[in-house]
Image (cartoon, rainbow, N blue to C red):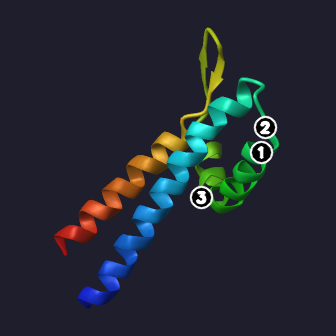
């Protein structure tokens, strides 16, 4: 694989990883009932960007029940997959 293409893919994966992390963090504020209009608007954009990859994972990985409700592990799984893909690309 040409080095330039690999660098572009790595860059896009890093950006997507940060977008996913932002969605994970903002989801705590939304669930706490602190949905400020700006936070809600940002979350909508993050949702649109990340949901196409999270939806298939969510159907494969059921939520885990905890004392506080259910925990969706699909964002964590996607984060680990992104890191794994980055590591594989670095090895090429």
Camera-side residue of 81 and 43:
43
Residue at the location (21% across, 69% down)?
90
Q: Which mark is residue 40?
A: 1
Q: How far across and how far down the image is residue 70, in percent?
A: 65, 22
Dot 1 and dot 2 residues touching (CB under 8 Å):
yes
Which residue position holds label 3? Answer: 53
Horizontally, is 92 left or right of 18 in the view?
A: left
Mark 3 or mark 2: whose residue is earlier in sequence: 2
Mark 2 crowdedness (10 Å alpha carbons): few <14, some 14-19, many ≥20? few
Q: How far across and how far down the image is residue 84, in percent?
A: 32, 56
Q: How far across and how far down the image is residue 34, in percent?
A: 75, 28
Q: Nearer the viewer, mark 3 or mark 2?
A: 2
Q: Secondary structure at mark 1?
A: helix
- Residue 24, located in which quarter of the rendered image? top right
Q: Nearer the viewer, mark 1 or mark 2?
A: 2
Which residue position holds label 2? Answer: 36
Horizontally, is 27 left or right of 24 in the view?
A: right
State the separation of the CA atoms marked 3 and 2: 26 Å
Mark 1 or mark 3: whose residue is earlier in sequence: 1
Q: Nearer the viewer, mark 1 or mark 3?
A: 1
In the picture shown, does residue 57 fall above or below 7?
above
Camera-side residue of 87 and 20:
20
Mark 1 crowdedness (10 Å alpha carbons): few <14, some 14-19, many ≥20? some
What quarter of the picture does the C terminus occupy?
Answer: bottom left
Q: Secondary structure at mark 2?
A: loop
Q: Secondary structure at mark 3?
A: helix
Q: Is residue 44 visible?
A: yes
Residue at the location (63% across, 30% down)?
28
Mark 3 crowdedness (10 Å alpha carbons): few <14, some 14-19, many ≥20? few
Q: Residue furthest left?
A: 91
């Amino acid at each position: 694989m040409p080095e330039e293409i690999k660098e572009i893919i790595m860059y896009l994966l890093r950006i997507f990883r940060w977008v996913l992390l932002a969605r994970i963090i903002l989801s705590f504020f939304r669930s706490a009932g602190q949905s400020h209009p700006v936070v809600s608007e940002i979350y909508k954009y993050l949702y649109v960007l990340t949901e196409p990859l999270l939806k298939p994972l969510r159907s494969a990985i059921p939520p885990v029940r905890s004392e506080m409700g259910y925990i969706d592990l699909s964002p964590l799984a996607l984060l680990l997959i992104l890191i794994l893909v980055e590591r594989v690309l670095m090895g090429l």
